[in-house]
Amino acid sequence: MKAVIFSEHGGTDVLRYADVAEPAIGARDVLVRVRACALNHLDIWVRRGMPGVKIPLPHIGGCDIAGEVAKVGAEVSNVRVGDRVALAPGVCCGHCEQCLAGKDNQCRQYTLLGYMYDGGYAEYVKAPAVNALPAPANLSFEEAAAVPLVFLTAWHMLITRAQLKPSEEVLILGAGSGVGSAAIQIAKRAGAHVIATAGSEAKLAKAKELGADEVINHAKQNIADEVRRITNRRGVDVVFEHVGQATWEQSMRSLAVGGRLVTCGATTGFEGKFDIRYLFSRNLSILGTYMGGKSELFDVFELVARGELKPVVDCVLPLEQAAAAQERLENREQFGKIVLRVP
Ligand SMILES: [Zn+2]
């Protein structure tokens, strides 16, 4: 099969479009003929290499996958050959306390397709059958691939962890990112008042189209000052963080008394500073999240099938152009998801 693989860590020049062996499946696996694979920052971290993380090489990245079931293992009963599916990105042991409690993203063996396992930058991918969910019929493969990671992450952050309420105000950082564009829709659907940030006027206009009530240009404006102005000095109940070091102090300063900062990432750097007195005296909470439980994807896909949440596709490129696609993501040129089409 054709795949985009890398045998050493580095820049996008390590990505090669090559012929590799089709994966062999086990009794509880499915083989999926990939039709579309959406990009995530994870793909870039995995390609560059991370200190203390040993990625199996050569490697195929990509964790947001939609396609058709091509083969099923002997013990598989939830899907059949030919079914249109989207794959849940997370892979877990399936039998520990966390897995059985539905918190598979807290399983000690939790990993993702395209991370410790080969992913979807290929014609075929192997996955546990339990990861195969029916793709909503109203979506193209490209749209279906744009859903799982970002909507699961944003849903888990806002609904499960931060418990966002209709009366609340929320600050969504990075509206142009995949998680940001998902978070705006989830927060609006939850009834909250949404303030979104982005770095260009074009992206701010798109954030408004998605439902943002107020927007802040973080390239020109101070986020915390603008939040104070918009909220009459009160601050927001929830800050949706994933940017990290570059915005952390402003995010903390943007919180109202009793506010919650929920974060899933640190794309600009890993160090965040704050005054501990500020944390306790204002009754603030900092909530860390990583992905979400597989069952939450059922909620997400139901709302996507009803048209209440919509995948935001920035552009679709052929698999061969994976390097150019990753560069677009690294340069933050996108609004929404960059998707690779696998012909
Ligand atoms: Zn487990």
Image (cartoon, rainbow, N blue to C red):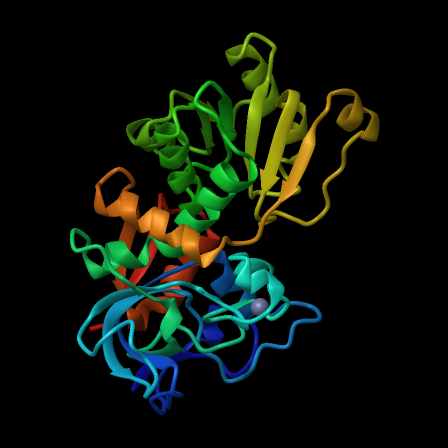
Q: Quadrant of residue 21?
A: bottom left
Q: Quadrant of residue 180?
A: top left
Q: Is residue 318 left or right of residue 219?
A: left
Residue 74 visible in image: yes
Quadrant of picture, ligand 1: bottom right
In this rendered view, identify the residue nearer to me: 164 or 98: 98
Q: Position of residue 97 (x, y in %)?
A: 61, 64
Q: Is residue 64 left or right of residue 233?
A: left
In this rendered view, identify the residue nearer to me: 228 or 106: 106
- Residue in view at x 59 percent, y 61 percent: 98
Q: Position of residue 245 (x, y in %)?
A: 66, 42
| Outermost residue, top side | 232
Q: Position of residue 266 (x, y in %)?
A: 61, 48
Q: Is residue 248 left or right of residue 312?
A: right
Q: Quadrant of residue 279?
A: top right
**Whether residue 315 is situated above or below residue 256 in the rendered picture:** below
Q: Position of residue 144 (x, y in %)?
A: 27, 56
**Whether residue 94 is situated above or below residue 195 in the rendered picture:** below
**Whether residue 17 is situated above or below residue 199 in the rendered picture:** below
- Residue in view at x 73 percent, y 46 percent: 271
- Residue in view at x 82 percent, y 30 percent: 276
Quarter in which the N terminus is drawn: bottom left
**Whether residue 242 is situated above or below residue 254 in the rendered picture:** below
Q: Is residue 241 left or right of residue 36?
A: right
- Residue in view at x 69 percent, y 68 percent: 51
In this rendered view, identify the residue nearer to me: 144 or 336: 144
Residue 11 visible in image: no
